[in-house]
Image (spheres, helix red, strand yellow):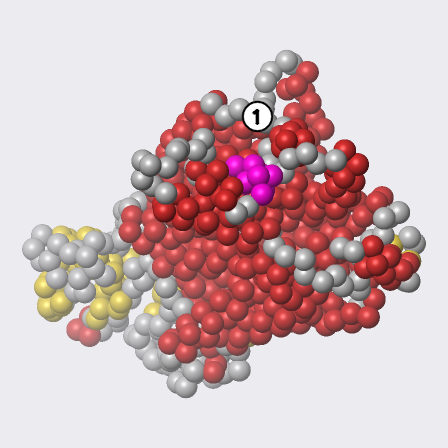
Amino acid sequence: MTDGKMDETKKKRKKTAECCGYPISIFFIVVNEFCERFSYYGMRAVLVLYFRYFLLWDDDLATSVYHAFVALCYLTPIMGAIIADSWLGKFRTIIYLSVVYAVGQVVMAVSTIHDITDADRDGTPDNFTLHIALSMLGLILIALGTGGIKPCVAAFGGDQFQEHQSRQLNTFFSVFYLCINAGSLLSTLITPVLRAQECGIHTQQQCYPLAFGVPAALMVISLVVFIAGSGMYIKTDPEGNIIWAVCKCIGFAIRNRFRHRSSAHPKREHWMDWAEDKYDKLLIAQIKMVLKVLFLYIPLPMFWTLFDQKGSRWTLQATTMSGDFGAFILQPDQMQTVNPILILTLVPIMDRVIFPLIKKCGLDFSPLKRMTVGMLFAASAFVCAALVQIEIDKTLPNFPSSSESQLKVVNMYNSSVNVTISPKDTLLIDSLESSAGYVTLDHQDITVSLNTSPVTTKAFSLIKGGRQTLVIPSDPSIMYLQEDLKSKPREGKNAIRFVNGWTADLNITTFSSELEPSVTSNYSLVNQGTRKFVLSNGAQSCEFSQKFGFGSSYTFLVPSTLFSTDCKSIKAVEDIQPNSVHMALQIPQYFLITTGEVMFSVTGLQFSYSQAPKNMKSVLQAGWLCTNAVGNIIVLIVAELGKLPKQWAEYVLFASLLVAVSIIFSFMAYFYTYIDPAEIEAQIRREQGLEPEEEKKETLEMEDKDKEQKNEQELKHTKL
């Protein structure tokens, strides 16, 4: 930058409006960041459940697409940094990609409206292809937007401060970081509550349009707020991107080495030395230092493989648990709020208590050792998740295999009956009762005999791999099979149905049509809590209430004495027991994974920046983001190709892989030699004959410029 341009910039900075010592423009940037983070984390919190329960994908596909999206979000910041530094500048990059971002959020919200393709008004979309296409388009646009603007917003905020505002600059980054965590925490609390509401034009379903619509609205507000401050911003021109320069230098070294691969050419100490024919020795030395750090990054993706599953596998695990905390009900996707809460708690405790205490004890707890311990904490978290999963599996029903059938018998007859199921199963069932559980059969064609007068016999063909209930009505000759659920009700809801033993048609709240005598209704889903049902036949009515937990299934038997007993004679038959393992059991695994994050992520970045030149921080950022992206891709591969029969086994597999990787990393760390980048750079400058005055001037300029970069980069990585 020439002296004239520097003077012009200083004059421009002096004219910047201030409030309480801060540039007014940064208030727009802070509000913009809060809204954007609310938008991103709010959408992401409910994303895997949208895949699982709206698009009806299985757990593996939902997990795979979720992690593919997250991986893309961690790759696009590299693109955003290059665009901002090389072509558009930070301001225009934020504007253009925020528009893409907002459009993506709106498209995503539209894709969740089931009524747009629900022609038969049954609450289920008729054209899933349209919803899938819209959601995938929306997610791609969101990934381009959120990743593209991420390396620009914090740096753009730093550009607004003048030289004398260093104290305000540090405060700004603290507030900026607080906004990121506040947006993450609040959105992860609020959007699951919005999702749990019911909405719709023709049928009331889980309100995914509201859960995705609010983040979309926040992103639009974020864009409007940022544009509103346009006239107050200090906008710098793009000055070139170091990542691109590093890539070109490495590419030239490789090509030059390949061209001179014959033995006629003398060997060089390092393969990067082949770039000396074109590039400055200082740049080459800086790249060597960066490559040394990037080599240590090779094992790191496995940590992120485990860490980012808290938004997919762990959320799906929570759907099979009880969220009743007494004073409040926690939704499965709200458990993710434990992570930002613990981050805000553990970071100061680690920095001000734990690490200083370890140092006072005389223990050598170097950054690389901290990272290794962080990996082991993450592995321990997945061991805890496996133990929790084993407890959950103990409470799950024993559903039939693909070659088996299961049968339960319900007796609506006015007396006890002996039920014989060929060839040898015999059940004694009292009136208005059911068999103790499901009978598992390895054959589908059966004959059922009842000891009624006269004896009733009837042949049935069972569904292979399914569950059914044999209903014996008041007229046993018309006994029939009713298909049952063969999996837990979705989203922790409760599936209920009624068998009408009354002598006439019945109207039952929550059911749209009348229930004829001796007929079993279809399933209806109800939320946790005490639910009241009004049963009426026009002239008479009574109220029946039942308390529900999470994930249960009930068949309610309505007797002929319904109204004379004021609905108290209704019998509840539990087909699938409610979730009994409490969500609180997930807290230890969240604590361990967050402790691992603090020790691994924050320490890893501090180590990286201490071992590489200051002007190479963006290269390290790119490498760090790539480790996160690769980690999510590993989850995708395992989810699609692993296909382990038990979920706890997958947790143990991931924990074992991370332990193995941590051992490899510990060996790499043992042989790593710490360096002083500033000393190496100074030595090269002296070898190049750089004048002391120029060296001092260049050093001061780099220190002033990078003082802001240090805050910016640490912020970007601590919570993306």
Can residue 320 be seen here? Answer: no
Q: Quadrant of residue 117?
A: bottom left
**Amino acid under label 1?**
Tyr
Q: Quadrant of residue 651?
A: top left
Q: Residues within 10 Å of mark 1 (few under 14, many from 20)?
A: few
User: Magenta span has 494?
Assistant: no
- Residue 107: image x %, image y %? 53, 75
- Against 579, residue 535 (above or below) is below
Q: Looking at the figure, which quarter contains the N terminus?
A: bottom right
What is the number of callouts on the image?
A: 1
- The stretch of residues the image draws in magenta is 280-288
- Against 645, residue 208 (above or below) is below
Near-viewer residue (348 or 609) = 609
Task: Tell me: 246 left or right of 163.
Answer: left
Q: Where does label 1 land, which residue?
A: 674
Q: At 39% across and 43% down in the image, what residue appears?
A: 257
Residue situated furthest bottom in the rendering: 119
Q: At 59% across and 62% down in the image, what residue appears?
A: 83
User: Magenta span has 286?
Assistant: yes
Near-viewer residue (668 or 463) = 668
Task: Tell me: 338 left or right of 268.
Answer: right
Q: At 56% across and 51% down in the image, what residue appears?
A: 245
Q: At 57% across and 25% down in the image, what residue appears?
A: 674
SS type, badge 1: loop
Q: Give the prevailing secondary structure in the magenta stretch.
A: helix
Residue situated furthest top in the rendering: 362
Q: Quadrant of residue 192?
A: bottom right
- Residue 384: image x %, image y %? 45, 35
- Residue 164: image x %, image y %? 88, 47
- Residue 143: image x %, image y %? 53, 63
